[in-house]
Amino acid sequence: MSSIKELSERIARKSAIVEKWLAGKNAKVSFDQEAKDEYPDTDGESEIGMVRMVVIDDTSAFCDLFLGPREVLAPVWGAAIDNAAQQFIYHFNILHAIPLDGEATYAEISAKVGLSERKVKPVVRKAMLNQMLREDVPDHVFQTASSALLLRDHNMMNYYGFFVEQILPASAKLTEALKKYKDSTTAQDTALSLTLNTKDVLFKYLEQSPELMARFVGAMEGVDKDPSQSQKHVITRYSWTELGKPLLSISVGGSSGFLSVELARNYPKLNFVVEDYKKNIEQGATQLLSELTERVKFVLHNFFDP
């Protein structure tokens, strides 16, 4: 285990390497809403990518050493409050109450969302601890890079909304589900089913609500914007060209086909069939580029069926 001194020296040394690299690319990183949506791409520069991850890991350990064992535990239960604040931000459309190019007072936000200022202010300030909004001037709220991204990118907002309104509540039901269903392998016996109070599997449940289904589809496309989940890893980290002759790939539960489409664009010898629910494949077929219609097909299929 590294000491505080060792960590601080390594963080300073590695940060200087990244800072020099950023300067060479004329790139800046900040919390301002004008910041780029993604960290500058380190593809093809594995050393910089590794250095960046070392700094991220070391700064986390550095903070933990200054906290001590008791305070390190605080975020475990504090995360529940953080998550509640994010759910509040989404459900009451707080972000839409603040102009991208300006500011809003708590009184103005309260009037727009229909809640008292006394209710709004503490929860918004809690969200600020996670870089969601900021208060540069007392009682005046501004957008940050992260909150502005959600407003600009509809799919990222869907990703955010699906997570805070479906996944977070379900995570709190995990233990209850395991106690109730034990080792059941039935698709409906899940924490999410308990949360939604339904006997249907998630996809059947979503089919009954066009609004929720649309958000889910958008969320799946938003997942691709998450660097750790990006489809570029599938596209670039596998030797698709070495497969040789033209072949057919079946994407089971492939949503609107966004991954298959990108693979088809990059590898002309690959053909695809995307299987999913009606709304998803209809959306995918509508968006499909004309030059790919012969190589990407959409088929209605429920992957829970044989």
Image (tube, rainbow, N blue to C red):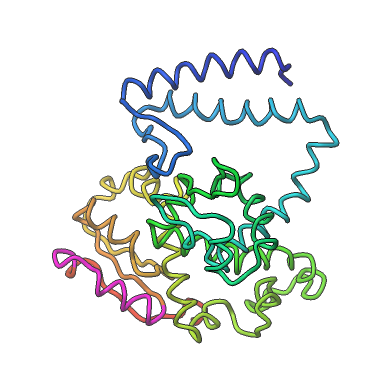
* Residue 40 picture quarter: top left
Of all residues, the one furthest to the left in this rendering is 291
Residue in the foreground of this view, choosing between 240 and 187: 187
Across and down, in percent, residue 181 comes to 77, 75
In the image, farthest residue toward the right: 70
Question: Which residue is found at the position 34% from the left and 70% from the top?
Answer: 274
Q: Is residue 99 left or right of residue 196?
A: left
| Front position in the image: 256 or 115 | 115
Q: In the figure, 30 relative to 175: above or below?
A: above
Total labels: the figure holds 0
Who's the residue at 56% across and 16% down the image?
12
Quadrant in which residue 280 is drawn: bottom left
The picture places residue 162, in percent across and down from the top left corner, at 54, 66
Q: Is residue 253 magenta?
A: no
x and y, in percent, of residue 179 in the image? 82, 70
Residues rendered magenta in the picture: 277-292
Q: Residue at x 52, y 68 (%)?
A: 112
Closest to the observer: 254 or 184?
254
Q: Is residue 211 above or below residue 67?
A: below
- The answer to whether residue 297 is above or below residue 154 is below
Q: Main secondary structure of the magenta part?
A: helix
Q: Please provide percent x and percent y for residue 50.
A: 49, 27
Position of 297 with respect to 210 (left or right) is left
Q: In which quadrant of the rendered image does the N terminus lie?
A: top right
